Amino acid sequence: MQVTNWSVGGGLLGLLVLGAWFIVYRRRAALHKQHLAFVKAQNEALEARVHERTRELHQKNEAIQQLLEKEKRLMQEQLDHKERELSIQAIHGQEKQALLTELLGEVRKLKKKEGWSKAKLLRTVEQKVYDVLQQGDNDANFMVHFEGVHPAFFQAILSHADNLTANEQKLCAYIKLGMNNKEVAQMLNVELGTVKSNINRLKKKLHLSPDDSFRQFIGNVR
């Protein structure tokens, strides 16, 4: 009878221990589940904040990009406007050179036909026209405006050949504006053949081969 009581007591004790273990296990499982839910909620909240922050940054980047593109368009429009002004100035200078050159030729023709007194007057007119053709003021103004549109052009050219003369630099500038050889000759008040010779000499100074395009080279200089 005593053994039976011990057996019953041991069984009850075992059940109590098993029940306590089961309760602890369930409690730990519940806590673990709560922890996982908390971590999941934190991760979801973090992902939401990251997503929102990414969206805000994307919007800011788009706004900055649009602003940069707008500024780029404005700068390009200003550059195009300056280039048009420069081209107009060059054309006017070219027309003036052509007109004065033609006038000088007519004066020289008249000087041969007229008498001594009129020839003397014509020589005075001839000298004045020649002086205007040789004036550097217009050239200086042109170069200032050109450098305003292409500020790094001459520096880039001189980095290839630092011994270019002032006329050679002007020739490069006129070519940069797209003038043909005849127009360049009028601007520089020289013969067409002289322009061709100067271009060949420039190609050598700039270390270009005979097959290289001088105009393409100048066009690529920034």
Image (tube, rainbow, N blue to C red):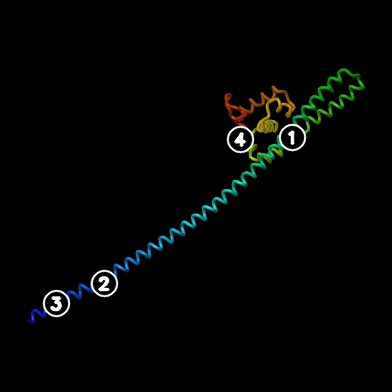
Marks 3 and 2 sit apart, C-alpha to C-alpha, by 21 Å
Answer with the quarter of the image where residue 81 lies: top right
Dot label at residue 99: none
| Comes first in the chain, label 2 or label 4 | 2
Mark 2 falls on what kind of element?
A: helix
Mark 3–mark 1 distance (CA, rounded to whole Å): 119 Å
Residues marked 1 and 4 touching at CB (< 8 Å): no
Looking at the image, residue 141 lies above or below residue 200: below
Q: Which residue is mark 1?
A: 139
Mark 1, other Cα within 10 Å: few <14 / some 14–19 / many ≥20: some
In the rendered structure, which amino acid carries the disc numbered 3?
Gly
Q: Which residue is mark 2?
A: 24
Q: Is residue 65 left or right of residue 6?
A: right
Considering only order in the chain, which callout, 2 or 3, is on the residue closer to the N terminus? Answer: 3
Disc nearer the start of the sequence (3/4):
3
The residues bearing labels 3 and 4 have C-alpha atoms spaced at a distance of 101 Å
Measured as percent of width and height from the top left, residue 123 is found at 86, 24
Q: Nearer the viewer, residue 126 or 66?
A: 66
Kind of residue indicated by mark 2: Val
Going from N to C along the chain, the mark reached first, 3 or 1, is 3
Q: Does dot 4 land on a helix, a strand or a loop?
A: loop
List the residue tagged with mark 4.
221
Q: Residue at x 32, y 65 (%)?
A: 33
Residue 135: x %, y % from top left: 78, 33
Residue 206 placement, left or right of 130: left
> Mark 4 is on which residue type?
Val
State the residue position of label 3: 10
Looking at the rendered structure, the kind of residue marked 1 is: Asp
Q: Are marks 3 and 2 in contact (CB under 8 Å)?
A: no
